[in-house]
Image: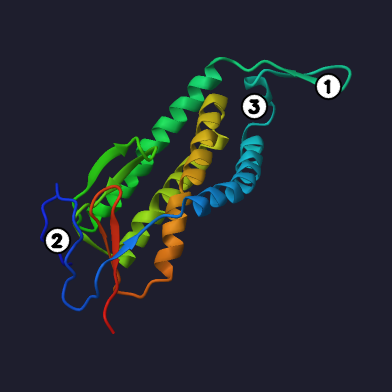
Amino acid sequence: MPTSQYEPSATLRPAAPDGYGDPEEFHYSLPIMLALILLLVGPALFVFGTLLWDGQGAALADFFGVTVTDDAGFEATIPIAIGGVFVAAVVVVTVLHELVHGLVFRLQGYRVSYGAAPQLGAFYAAAFHQFQARNDTILVGIAPLIVLDALLVPLFFVPIPVVAVFAFVAVLFNTLGAAGDIYLLARLLRMPRGTLLYDSDIRHSYVLYPEA
């Protein structure tokens, strides 16, 4: 795998390796990613919500303090602990999401940097200043969605409602938070085999296409 001539602290346009054209800037489309989230939220709530209800049933209603009244209505008292479960699930799954990205990078031989980008409202695991093969990046991008959802969904059926609700929030956030990964995957699948990607910093990324 070709490596960059630049130091990790540099923010520069990479020099193309032999056999590749000039680097082209790569940008994420915020409107498209927001549209993806909106498209995902309904199906995700329905599918995961149905699985959660199948796994917990009446215990879920008790957990949320839902009581059916004589006039066919209901009352709900949301425990304060629900807020803690929600926050904990979001924090844990965010960390795990980036760790899975980083682990797949490392398994493929890349050096990984972890961090936060407050200006973008995001955390990241990135292989800065290294040329990344298209197929490697596909695996890195899709891994958290597949791995974490597959590990968390079985927890919906654990006979402990707080664990199941934690898993539900984590799965939902992980799935919706993968909108950027899905967008990247769609773009990568349209690129020719042999394409390289290069992250100079959290704001600057490039694509290098093989010359015909």
Taking the spot 46% from the left edge, 48% from the top edge, the residue there is: 178
Please indicate whether residue 42 sits to the left or right of residue 121 in the image.
right
- Mark 2 or mark 3, which is nearer the start of the sequence? 2
Q: Is the C terminus in the top left, top right, bottom left or bottom right quadrant? A: bottom left
Three-letter code for the amino acid on which mark 1 is drawn: Gly
Residue wearing tag 2: 4
The residue that mark 3 highlights is 60
Q: Residues within 10 Å of mark 2 (few under 14, many from 20)?
A: some
Give left or right: position of 171 versus 50: left
Q: Is residue 120 above or below residue 91?
A: below
Task: First in sequence, mark 1 or 3: give its number.
Answer: 3
Q: Nearer the viewer, residue 145 or 163?
A: 145
Question: Is label 2 in a helix, a strand or a loop?
Answer: loop
Q: Amino acid at mark 2?
A: Ser
Q: Secondary structure at mark 3?
A: helix
Residue 64: image location, x then y, percent: 64, 21
Label 1 residue SS? loop
Q: Which residue is mark 1?
A: 73
